[in-house]
Image: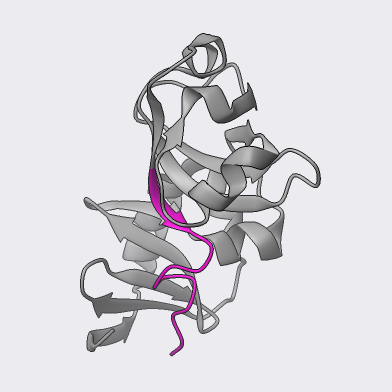
Amino acid sequence: MKVKQRHHLKKKKLKELKRDLGEYSTIIPNKSSVEYLEVDPNPFILIDGQPYIIIIDEKPFPTLKAALENEIGGKKVVVDMGAIKFVTNGADIMSPGIVETDENIKQNDVVIIVEETHKKPLAIGIAEITGEEMVNNDSGKAIQNIHYIGDDIWNLEI
């Protein structure tokens, strides 16, 4: 990835970023170095030099590194062991592979996909249906996979 621009965020922009992150805003500790990194296809927010936030369609999302290192909460979807290899290869998450979800997941929510044994994050996606529908449906796509272990974002080095 080629870096087009890199600069520190001003306090006003940082405040907006925390507001937009909502329940995930805890991944930005006070007095941390927060930088904006413009790269193709999506810009990042670096927290103390680590790519913790990705900006997709003008909205900030935590990256998997942020999820793993900060034990963030948020809306989780648990997939069975058979779905892991597909999820970590970038496939969208299908309803039959989903074992459990947070009940309050709505369409277009950002969700963290975790595996059922150790509850470790595998991917971050956007819900295409509600959490209840994910568990009850026997077929069809439930979540669009936007970031997964082993992708370009995961391997980003600054």
Q: Is residue 28 visible?
A: no
What is the quadrant of the C terminus in the image?
bottom left
The image quarter in which residue 140 lies: top left
**Residue reaching furthest right?**
118
* Residue 79 location (% of width, % of height): 62, 35
* Residue 52 location (% of width, % of height): 50, 67
Q: Is residue 133 visible?
A: yes
Provide the residue span drawn in magenta. 145-158
Magenta span main SS: loop
Q: Nearer the viewer, residue 134 or 73?
A: 134
Q: Nearer the viewer, residue 77 or 99?
A: 99
Q: Nearer the viewer, residue 134 or 96?
A: 96
Residue for point 60% across, 47% down: 84
* Residue 91 location (% of width, % of height): 41, 47
Magenta span includes 116:
no
Q: Looking at the picture, does residue 36 appear above or below residue 69?
A: below
Q: Looking at the picture, does residue 111 appear above or below residue 89?
A: above
* Residue 12 location (% of width, % of height): 33, 63
Residue for point 34% across, 73% down: 10
